[in-house]
Amino acid sequence: MKLSPNSPLQKLMDTMPQQGIVTWIGIRPKRKAPLLSLNKVEALTLKGLAGDHFSGSATSKRQITLIQHEHIALIASVMQQEDLSPGLLRRNVVVKGINLHAFKDRRFWVGNALLEYTGECHPCSRMEDVLGPGGYNAVRGHGGITARIIQGGEIVVGDVVIIKSSPSY
């Protein structure tokens, strides 16, 4: 259901003065390989991240994955762990300080790259192996989002994450 641009609910959904910060970046050089932690990565227009095994498909809705830093702490708590390495969750970018789910149907900037929200990033069965029994359910609802890279550019740890000012494409 599309809301009128002047509806009170649409105005609330369009109000996002907060900015997030990139706190971690990782790529998977091969399928099922551990993630490599990087300080910066090149986002390639309509492809993916340079060096990531998912890179290359212009039609893919999963060119890059993002997860909230705050959700990693929640998942660790559910699993009764003090800390959890972001690489275990197999997402490319960790963002702190902004609600990624509020980007639904929107475009947003991560550093110099313009991304487009394409959906939620659901956990896979590998979470049971990585986190232990119950890992899959611990990540449910907190697995982050998937996005398409509309305009490539460099993404660096410390970069700002902000919603594109106009919701129209």
Image (spheres, grey):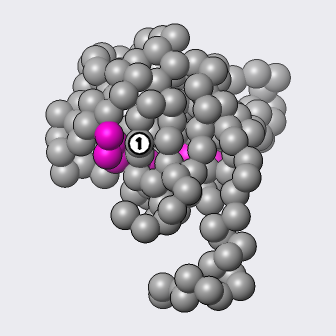
Q: Residues within 10 Å of mark 1 (few under 14, many from 20)?
A: many
Instruction: Please name whichever residue, 72 or 132, is drawn nearer the observer in this view of the structure.
Output: 72
Task: Using the image as rendered, state which of residue 136 and residue 65 is in the foreground.
Answer: 65
Magenta stretch in the rendered image? 142-151
**Is the residue 158 above or below the residue 149 in the image?**
above
144 magenta-colored:
yes
Which residue is drawn at the image coordinates 56% and 82% (left, top)? 5
Question: Can you say which quadrant of the picture contains the C terminus?
Answer: bottom left
Residue 19: quarter of image: top right
Q: Does the magenta-highlighted stretch encompass residue 117? A: no
Marker count (numbered): 1
Q: Is residue 101 visible?
A: yes
Query: Could you say where residue 66 lies in the image, as x and y percent from the top left?
Result: 52, 39
Relative to 73, 152 lies left or right? left
Residue in the picture at 74% in, 39% down: 97
Q: Position of residue 3 (x, y in %)?
A: 54, 86
**Residue 92 visible to the viewer:** no
Seen at 58% across and 18% down, the residue is 157
- Image quarter of residue 50: top left
- Main SS category, magenta section: strand
Q: 80 or 48: which is nearer to us?
A: 48
Q: Is residue 99 left or right of residue 38?
A: right
Quadrant position of residue 54 = top left
Three-letter code for the amino acid on which mark 1 is drawn: Leu
Q: In this image, 162 relative to 83: left or right?
A: left
Residue found at x 32% / y 33%: 152
**Under tag 1, what secondary structure?**
strand
- Relative image position of residue 100 (x, y in whole percent): 61, 50
x then y, percent, for residue 87: 53, 22
Residue receiving disc 1: 114
